[in-house]
């Protein structure tokens, strides 16, 4: 999520999740990688699996607060982009901890193991440094944050730990740079920052897919058109993340198709890391966008796998049914997409 209102939505989510999972205990856990899927990669504009094009239909999830994931199986969710709101304290492996905000956090390896058990790829993405409103990553210039150097250390630790687990993809930052480019942003700044973060991962020997966000809090693909091929030069297994909210969903259907088509024509591998009907207080209909992305074989993650009928972006009601409350039937719309045959 992005723009000012979204910060408060994320913090509200954190508060609710902390309450929901604060009494959970750590489940018995074996750190096993014996059933790791074969290597994934990118080729041209495609994600590939065993050298064959692969399309994923997934969701953003909060399993760090309560590792699980079998509930996603009924929707055929095959990739989870995992929210890490407290990068500083979330354990990489081991037992559940209680962080300084009073939240119980499962280890990243526990989350990965649960997804893997359910044949699901995991994207690990830092959304906040310490779980508080003041350290959300969205809208920031990475190098200007107070936690920039410390985050690089954690990213390196993640890279080392997961380098032999090819079904774990690290996303280097969530929604960088200001929505309206009023922070001095240039595409050269994006190039420099993203090269630094990708280099940290690759220098550990981790050759898994790395997910790299676009500019303008994830919604602006023009940086990929301008710099994407230059960025990809000399690199392997890079996947660009686009967040499709008002800058996409309020566009015309021909323009949406044209923009997605241009990315593919330029051999830029992309995933839609977030999309939802509500952002910054605007109700939108993602149907046409999702149809266009699906028919082009582009992978998509929906915001957000959450049981909460009071949140218009939540895919599920408290009872676990598709959430269609004042949101253009978002739950059913996405469920219908997720159960369709993949079209890579």
Image (tube, grey):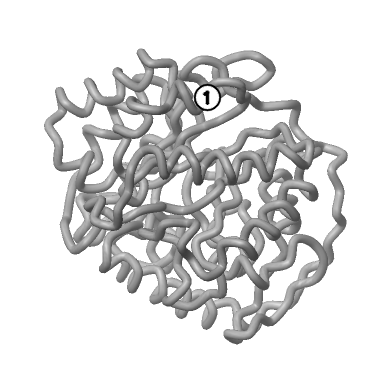
Depth check, front residue: 260 or 50? 260
Q: Residue at x 65, y 81 (%)?
A: 99
Give the SS element for disc 1: helix
Q: Residue at x 34, y 34 (%)?
A: 223
In what quadrant of the picture does the N terminus appear? bottom left
Picture mark count: 1
Q: Height in image: 235 above or below 44?
A: below
114 left or right of 277 in image? right
210 left or right of 306 in image? right
Q: Residue furthest left?
A: 252
Percent x, y of residue 301: 44, 43
Depth check, front residue: 321 or 282? 282
The residue wearing badge 1 is 232
Q: Residue at x 26, y 68 (%)?
A: 5
Percent x, y of residue 153: 70, 59
Q: Quadrant of residue 168?
A: top right
94 left or right of 300 in image? right
Q: Residue at x 52, y 24 (%)?
A: 232
Percent x, y of residue 293: 34, 28
Depth check, front residue: 300 or 1? 1
Percent x, y of residue 94: 82, 66
Classed neighbour count for the residue bearing mark 1: other residues with Cα under 10 Å, few (<14), some (14–19), many (≥20) = some
């Amino acid at each position: 999520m992005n723009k000012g209102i979204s910060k408060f939505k994320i913090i509200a989510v954190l508060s609710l999740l902390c309450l929901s999972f604060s009494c959970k205990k750590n489940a018995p856990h074996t750190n096993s990688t014996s059933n790791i899927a074969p290597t994934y990669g990118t080729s041209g504009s495609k994600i590939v699996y065993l050298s064959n094009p692969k399309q994923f239909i997934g969701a953003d999830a909060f399993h760090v607060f309560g590792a699980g994931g079998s509930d996603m199986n009924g929707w055929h969710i095959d990739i989870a982009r995992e929210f890490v709101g407290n990068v500083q304290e979330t354990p990489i492996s081991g037992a559940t901890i209680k962080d300084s905000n009073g939240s119980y956090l499962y280890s990243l390896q526990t989350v990965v193991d649960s997804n893997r058990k359910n044949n699901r790829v995991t994207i690990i993405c830092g959304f906040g440094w310490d779980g508080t409103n003041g350290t959300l990553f969205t809208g920031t210039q990475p190098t200007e944050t107070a936690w920039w150097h410390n985050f690089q250390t954690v990213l390196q630790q993640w890279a080392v730990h997961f380098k032999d687990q090819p079904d774990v993809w690290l996303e280097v930052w969530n929604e960088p740079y200001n929505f309206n480019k009023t922070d001095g942003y240039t595409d050269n700044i994006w190039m420099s920052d993203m090269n630094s973060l990708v280099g940290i991962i690759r220098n550990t020997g981790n050759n898994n897919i790395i997910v790299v966000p676009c500019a303008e809090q994830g919604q602006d693909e023009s940086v990929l058109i301008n710099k994407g091929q230059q960025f990809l030069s000399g690199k392997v297994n890079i996947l660009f993340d686009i967040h499709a909210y008002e800058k996409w969903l309020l566009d015309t259907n021909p323009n949406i198709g044209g923009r997605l088509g241009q990315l593919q024509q330029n051999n830029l591998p992309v995933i839609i890391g977030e999309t939802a009907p509500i952002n910054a207080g605007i109700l939108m209909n993602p149907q046409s966008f999702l149809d266009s992305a699906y028919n082009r074989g582009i992978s998509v993650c929906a915001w957000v796998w959450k049981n909460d009928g009071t949140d218009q972006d939540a895919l599920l009601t408290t009872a676990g049914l598709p959430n269609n409350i004042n949101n253009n039937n978002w739950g059913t719309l996405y469920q219908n997409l997720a159960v369709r045959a993949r079209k890579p």
